[in-house]
Amino acid sequence: MGGKLYKLHSYVEETPMDRDVNITPFTDLIISNAAQQVAKSYFDDNAPAALDSAEVAAQETALQEKLQDVFDALGLDAAINLINSSFSADHSGLDAALDIIDIETDAVTNVATITNLINGSSIEDNVTDTDDNDTAIIIVDAEVIATVTDIQAIASLFDVFAEKFAAGLPTAASIDSLFASEFLHDDQAKNQFLTDITTDPSVIGINFLSVSIRDIDSDLGTAIVDFNVEFNGVIEAESETWQVNKDSELGWQLLGNQLFFEADTLTFHCNDNDGTDENTFGCGLNVSFYDNDFANNGTNGAPIASATMSIIDGSDAVTVKDIVYLGNAEYNGPGELSVYNQSEQNYQGDYASFGNSEGEVDPSIFVVGDIIRYQLYTGQLDISQPPQPMVRVATEVASFEKTLLFTPATSGLYPALTAESISALANFTLDQDLTVAWTLQPGTTIDTILVIIDDNQGNHYDVEDESISAEQTSTVINSSIFAETLLNDPNFDQNNFTLLVRVYSIAPTTGQFHSTDYRQSFVEIPASNVSCDTESPWNDATDKPTVFYSTNDFKAAIADCATQFTLPDVVKADLAGITYYLDDEHITFDASADNFVLTSYGVDEISGTVDDETYYGVVSYLADSIVEFAYSATQGGPILGRDLMRIKEQTTFNGKTIFKATVLWEFYEWAESDGDNQDESHAGAELYTQVYAVDADFDWDAWYNQ
C-alpha cells in the first residue's frame, strides 16, 4: 500500500465459524504488547508460546484508552472490541479511525509510534513494557470530523468513477467534473486522458479496490490516494497512486499520478517466441519509459534521454544488487527509452533476459521488500564503452521508488492457440476476421491478444485486444481494423508481410505475464525466379550448395511443373512397405509408412560393406501430396535435417519404373539453415530433382550415361 509492504497480525485461541477476527494495525499492536515483542517476531517463532487471554484483553483495553478521544469523536460504541467487533471498509466508524491513525513499530527498539495523521502529533508505546499506558492521542473533534468527511468524499469520487463505466463508455462531458483542470497522468493532460478512457472498451467494468487515503490536508485541500485497479475481473497486483485536490465549487477532484512521463515499471515476463515447436524462449523483465510531451517536464523542451532502474537490497536500503540501463536508440523517436544490453551492445525494446551475463539480470537477486529505484535524465546514455554504460552529462528530472511485492517465476506458464486458430493464421487474409482461441495453464487468466503485421518495406502495424474478460476462451479480431488501415495504404506490400499473434496470460496473484508467439509469413513468389527444373549448384569444397532456396521456392517449382504436365497424387498407402533406391543409398518404409530407414553406401558407394551408414526418419504427409522426411542418426534422436519431396512424374527406363521428384533438402548444421523454424520464406536449403527407382537392380550407370 502506497509503495510500502505491510504484514499485519491478529490472535485468536478458538473461535466459532460465525465470529469475526480483525487483522489491522490495531490488532498487530495489541498482540505485540501482549507478547512483549513485535508481533512479526512472535509469529515467526516456530513454536510461539500461547498468549495469556487476559493479557490480550488488557492490551486491547489499553489501546482503546490511548485512542478514546478518536473513538469518541467518531461516535464509536463504547463496547467495541478492536479484535472482534465487525466493521465495514467504507471509511466510517472503526475504518475511519484506521484512516487517521498510523502505527509504525521499530523491530530493533520494540517501540511503536502512534501518529495522529491529521496534525502529525504522536505518542510512543514500548511493547516490552505492559504498563506504559498513561499517554493518549489528543485530537480536536472538529478536525477529525472534517478529515473523515473529506476521506469519505474522496472515496466516493472513485465509486462514481467506476459507476460511470459500469455498463458502457460514458461521454467525456459526463465525467469532466471528476477531473481537475491540472490533471496529469502518465504524460497525458486531462482532455487527452478523457478521450482515451471514453473510447477504450477495456475500461468498461473498471473497479477500484483497497482505496486508501493518506497525507490528507483538509485546509489545503490535498491528499494522496493508493488503490488497486480491477479490469475485466482481474485485479492488478501492483497498486496505483494518484493525487486529488479540492475545488472550492466542485469539491474533490482527481489529479492523476502527476507524472510527466509514461512509465511501464518493472514487471516479470516469460515468452515462448514460437508456439509451433517444443522449444521455449525464456523469462526476463520488462521496463520502459516514454516522454511524449517535452513542454511539461520542466526541461525547457528537452526530452528524457536516459534512465536507470536500480535493484536495491530492502534489508539495508543501500546495497545496489544490479542496474538496468535505458537509453534512446537511434531507431526510436525522442523521449522513447529502451533497455540496453551490454553483451549484445544494442537496445532491445523493453526487455532484459534473466541470466548471468552482462546485460542480463540474475533472477535470484530479487527478494520481496527490495527497493526498485527509477531515475530519469535528459543526458544521453553513454555507450562508448559497452560493458559500462553510464549517464555522464545529465540532469536528473525525476526519481521515484517502488517496493518489490513478488519474486519472479523463471519457468513459463505458456498459453497456447488451438489447432483451429493456428490453421486460421496460415489462411489469414487482410479482409477477413481473424478468430483466435486459446487454452491456459492453471493459475493464469487471459490478458491480451496482440496482433502485429510487418511488411518488407518497413511498415509496421499493431493492434491489441485488451477488453477480453477472464471467462473468454476466444476473441475475434475485426477485419475492418486491417482493411481500413492496410488495404488502403499504397505503401503497404499486401503480398509480402508477416503476421504475428502473441497471446498474453497473467498470473493474477503476482502480476507476472506469460505469452506465446505465433508467426505466419505471406510471400509472393515471382514465377520467373524458380522453374520446375531449378537446382542448387553444389560446392564440393564446402560440401553444401552455393545457392539456397526456401519452402516457398520449392512450392513455386512444383507449381511450374504443374503447368507442364499432370502431377501424380501421392497418398500414404503408396509408400507403405516399399523401398526407394537411389544410386548410392536406399530408403525403406515400414508397413504403416510412418517411419523409414535410410542406408547410405558410404565412400565406396557399395551396399552391404563396413562403411555403410544408417539413418532413421519419420514421414509426414503434408498438403498437395508433399511428403516430409525428417532424419535422425538414432531412432527417435534429434533431427539432423529434413527433405520436402513431391513426386512430379512417373515413367520407365529400360523397363524399370522410376519416379522423378522435386526435393528440398535442409541440413540443420548449415549456417544458412534456420533449423526447425518453419519460416517458409527463409532460404536455407538445397533444391534439386531426385530420381527414385523401385527395383534394387536398376541400372544407374545406364541412366547417367544416356
Image: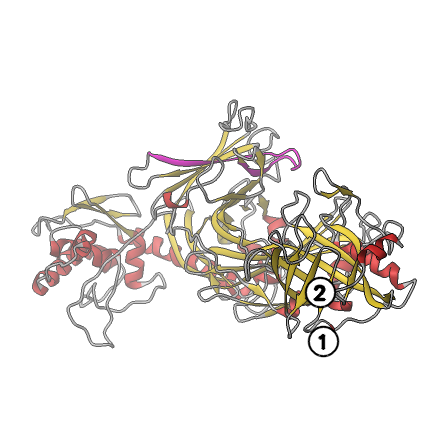
Q: Can residue 216 be seen in this snapshot?
A: no
Percent of width and height locating residue 278: 55, 59
* Amino acid beneath label 2: Asn
**Residue 620 lies in magenta, yes or no?**
no
Q: Can residue 667 be seen in this snapshot?
A: yes
Query: Would you name the residue on which mark 2 appears?
Result: 478
Q: Secondary structure at mark 2?
A: loop
Residue 438 falls in image quadrant: bottom right
Circle 1 crowding by C-alpha within 10 Å: few under 14, some 14–19, many from 20 = few
- Vertical order, 380 against 401 (above or below): above
Give whichever of discs 2 and 1 has the lower sequence position.
2
Q: Which residue occupies the extreme right position in the image?
A: 564
Identify the disc placed on residue 573: 1
* Amino acid beneath label 1: Ala
Which one is in front, 35 or 166?
35
Kindly indicate whether the residue at mark 1 contacts the one at mark 2 (C-beta within 8 angstroms).
no
The quadrant in which the C terminus is found is bottom right
- Vertical order, 545 against 523 (above or below): above
Task: State the residue at coordinates (71%, 37%).
Answer: 541
Number of numbered labels in the structure image? 2
Range drawn in magenta: 319-340
Percent of width and height locating residue 675: 63, 51
Which one is in front, 265 or 568?
568
Q: Specify whether 326 is left or right of 216.
A: right
Task: State the residue at coordinates (20%, 64%).
Answer: 83
Q: Specify whether 308 is left or right of 66.
A: right
**Residue 334 lies in magenta, yes or no?**
yes
- Distance CA(mark 2)–CA(mark 1): 42 Å
Q: Specify whether 512 is left or right of 520.
A: left
Which one is in front, 433 or 245?
433
